[in-house]
Amino acid sequence: MEYNLASLQPALPEIFLLSAACLILVIDLFLTERTRLLTYGLSLAALAGAVALTLYAAGPEREILFHGSFVRDPMSDVLKIGLLLISLFAFVYAKDYLIELDILRGEYYVLGLFGVLGMLVMISANSFLTVYLGLELLALCLYALVAFHRDSGAGAEAAMKYFVLGALASGMLLYGISMVYGATGQLTFPEVAGVIAGGDADQTVLVFGLVFIVVGVSFKFGAVPFHMWVPDVYQGAPTSVTLFLGSAPKIAAFALTMRLLVDGMGSLVEQWQNMLIILAVLSMALGNVVAIAQSNVKRMLAYSTISHVGFIFLGLLAGTDKGYTAAMFYAITYALTAAGGFGVITMLCRKGFDAENLHDLKGLNDRSPWLAFMMLLIMFSMAGVPPTVGFFAKLFVLDAVISVDMVWLALVAVFFSIIGAFYYIRAVKMMYFDKPIDTAPLAASMDTQVMMSINGLAMLGFGLFPAALLGTCRAAFSG
Amino acid sequence: MLETYLPVLIFIVIGTAVGAAMIGLGFALSPNRPDSEKNSPYECGFEAFEDSRMKFDVRYYLVAILFIIFDLEIAFLFPWAVVLDQIGMVGFWAMMIFLGILVVGFIYEWKKGALEWE
Amino acid sequence: MDAVIALWTELPVVIQIVMKIVAIMLPLMLLVAYYTYAERKIIGYMQVRMGPNRVGFFGMRLWGLGQPIADAVKLMFKEIIIPTGASKTLFLIAPMLTIGPALAAWAVFPFDAGLVLADVNAGLLYILAMTSLGVYGVIIAGWASNSKYAFLGSIRSAAQIISYEIAMGFALVGVLVAAGSLNLGDIVNAQQGSVFHWFWLPLLPLFLVYFISGVAETNRAPFDVAEGESEIVAGFHVEYSGMTFAVFFLAEYANMILISALSALMFMGGWLSPLPQNWVDGVFLLDDGFQWLLLKTFAFMFLFLWFRATFPRYRYDQIMRLGWKVFIPITIVWIVVVSVMRVAEMPWWFN
Amino acid sequence: MSFEKFLFYVFAAILVFAAVMVITRKNPVHSALFLVLAFFNSAGLWMLAEAEFLAIALVLVYVGAVMVLFLFVVMMLDINIAELRAGFVRNAPVAILVAIAMVIELVIVVGPQRFGLDEVAAPAAKPAGYSNTEELGLALFTQHLYAFEIAAVILLVGIVAAIGLTMRRRPDTKSQDPSRQVTVKAKDRLRVIKMDAEEKA
């Protein structure tokens, strides 16, 4: 195959981001403490450039590159843009926190960019090999980021846990992949799907492979019962990292599941549907119930994440385009919401004080009505209160589940969402009706404020006009 | 192909066996009269105190980690060099990009002072 | 004669191989023994001393030629001391792990056109893998001894060995790019022509890096901080005595010979004659043959001794700087240069 | 039984033995060394499968590099062995259960009824000139080019992460730079000040 600028066009976002990240890594070496913010600016520019290139390369057709290991299709376009924009939010929120804690080092942004690159690779993966490498690239960056605050013992411990369990999950995934490869003799998804559909592959081996792949994916997603690492890692990592970890990778995990289960093993839907039902129900149940008991806000949001992962699985397990659309909508909007939620927490931190506890939110309205309102929108969206976007996300997923005749599952989901609403509303109550414990003024830089406003209002905006985003998501699967 | 490796296997076995045989010979021929002074680990005139296996500078671990990374790079370079004639310019540039990415890492190491032994 | 050949081919393959191995190993051991003698003699003369000149055979002095034999016998009868607190098994395994790879690397070494024990495709890779195992003996010896000096020496030495191994590996990649094959025989054949077709010329920087790294890899002067008598007595093998020490000693010299022979093979045309082929075709001793390889190897072995007599010891930070900050950049750049030459088929080496 | 088969069983037996020793030895250094032995024997198995490049690369990379780091870590860190042992005994029943489950699962999946010689024909022996390295290179630099470049990025992230997490400049070192010492000028060190003579009070 010939390689030139024209034939490489579908991969331009990845190529650009890689070059930019390498360049920023080198530039950062020559910066002093005072000019360190240049790294920040360049990283944002790199993300913005990647967005532009994704739009430039986008189109309704499917393009395959690099001997079938890379694919660009409408789904990847939408996911990439969502991912890049949400990472942009995360990078902006992280800046003030890093400055306050005196850990502003270029590595945060560089590792973040490489992590984003890994996610792009996953989104555009068309073979088991690529998807695995993308996942490892992301995971490696995340392990390092969790341990980013070197003087923090909790951070190191969290990184260790994350690393060990993450490596185990990678092993599971790889084991499953090797079985599927053994059964089908193919690595690229369309060919694997072809062999499976042709009925030539050994069913037992395939199903065992599938089990391991699903286990690996659930580990990465943090679905119950493979969620043990989530609360500890979210709590132990610096908030700026939790913010990144808790938002954008959800989109990548969605892509991972889509590529592996739908693109690669779509005809085994009956098998993985049952596995996902168990995972989804357990995640929603445990996530929502345990979150109530948490007093640490990062931990609470970690359990909340687990429950939202259950919802994403709910959409996926419908096994229809409608379900995938709903799950995609859910993943993107949840990632945005989570970025905002952790963003607010980073804004509560300042030198020598790491806001972690739920009661740090108390009286936020008195200290900063604007920030409290943004947090209100975010919490409502997480709880699924109309007219925020979270409501519609849940609605679409439930609709998809009902349309494949699994009403009981929809009822279970609604039941646990109502339980979940309790702790979100409790946080809102603390912000508006409790006296502040700490009355220090909240200072946030201009860019953070602007981004936070966009983020908060987006909760409302997408909620009032969900059709635009939903239409985009739908277009991704209509082709 | 396999039969060419048989001598290699035998050579490895014999090579190690020679070492073992020589040490065995040493034990067979030499006297063995241990005493506590003779058997004490070497020290400059005083009694050995504390455990001799201590922690040491993290830099040594860092060297070992960097060594692994570069060793892997070499492992990638070997098949490339062998098929350089057959893979054409695409293969050539693929390796140049690979090397370029790792040179970035090398510059990073250098500037961060990971290669500094002060 | 025919009967002998018939008898030979009748032997089971394994016996044949074992006999061939013995035919490689015995001369090697003898060479090691007399290399130590040569070292003392040559350095002696360089320092205007006589070197060993007493021990001979049958009452004759013979310039001290009996010295290595006497040393070997002496070491055999020396007590093997195992320090208290040492892990006994590992303490004894360490020297075996050092000598095993040092000898086993010779399995794929071609001594003349077609004269090789195992003509494997991945010969160069095998050599690199075997040399990379040498570090185990050092680490285990240092740790098993339960002595601070041994431990310090082994850590220093291990970090040094692995650092130079990268430079060595890159240099080998350069050879590989130039020759286009991992087979050592093919590498020599790719240097056909005359002295100007050998790889030392197009790969000059890599050649220098390889040989100097080889010196560092074997822990020889001026890179012998691991032994650094004045600082940490004898480094990782301070607790070893008798035959256990002798095995380390043997392995060190076997490694030096290996590095010399490999340098001769990969950069100096191996058994090829330095004169153009049409001049020497069929001429006794001047034609391609084992004698050239031997001569070239001896030249490199002499360099080892010359270095030791000439250069003062490097400081540890200087050693690490040389390995990481000088050699690795040089080799990376030169690999790119060589591969460009190769792809562009530029000078006459690569046609 | 052919000689190859015999070698296979020898390598496999030592491999399993070494692997068991890795997890049962008290001393972590012994465990690491048994792991080295295990790698060696897997290299032997790969060699029997005619994957010469991968077999030697396994020795080069895993034995020659990765295990060296392992040894560095286990030798030089004070690992509390007794504490580890307690966990070992406590968790042993669960671990054995999982292991048995894995073995059963493996037998079901890769047993002879699926991947036996009846199901999958043995590959033809390779001709003498066959170079495994060459085949690998051709596949790596055409088909798997994209994966190869991602591998480079992963290695780069490895470098950045390792240095970013461990590197600290030590403020207490007293290193000297000889070239600066040699090039020092008198006026850098000594300042001659013109002063008026003081009158005696």
Image (spheres, coloured by chain):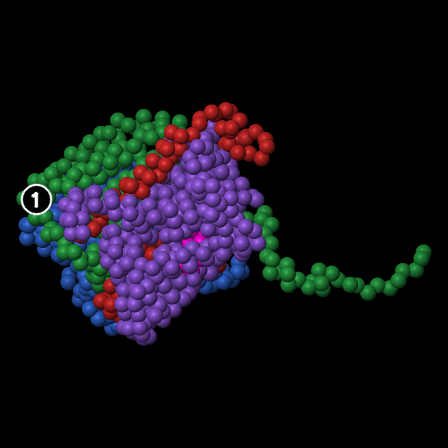
Instruction: Identify the residue at horizontal 57%, vertical 54% (top origin).
Output: C48
Q: Nearer the viewer, residue A322 or A371?
A: A322
Q: Which chain is blue?
A: A
Chain for disc number 1: D
* Mark 1 surroundings within 10 Å by alpha-carbon count, few (fewer than 14), some (14 through 19), many (20 or more): few
Q: Is residue B104 visible?
A: no
Q: Which residue is mark 1?
A: D117
Magenta stretch in the rendered image: C209-217
- The single residue placed furthest to the front in the displayed view is C59
**Residue A103 within the magenta-colored segment of the rendering:** no
Q: Position of residue A169 (x, y in %)?
A: 27, 43
A204 and C24: which is toward the camera: C24
> Which quarter of the image is occupied by the C terminus of chain C?
bottom left
Q: Where does residue A345 sit, x and y in percent of width and height?
A: 42, 48
Q: Residue at x 79, y 63 (%)?
A: D193
Using the image as rendered, state which of residue C66 and residue A453 is in the foreground. C66
Tell me: residue C197, above or below residue C68: below
Residue at (21%, 45%) from the top-left corner? C16
SS assignment at label 1: loop
Q: Colour of chain D?
A: green
Q: In the rendered structure, which amino acid carries the disc numbered 1?
A: Leu
Query: Chain in purple?
Result: C
- Which picture quadrant has residue C209? bottom left
Which residue is at 31% across, 30% downward?
A: D24
Q: Is residue A344 left or right of residue D93?
A: right
Image location of residue C307, percent across then percent down: 50, 56
Q: Position of residue C14 (x, y in %)?
A: 20, 43
Magenta: main secondary structure: helix
Give me the chain that's red. B
- Which residue is nearer to you in this view: C326 or D158? C326
Q: Is residue C10 visible?
A: yes
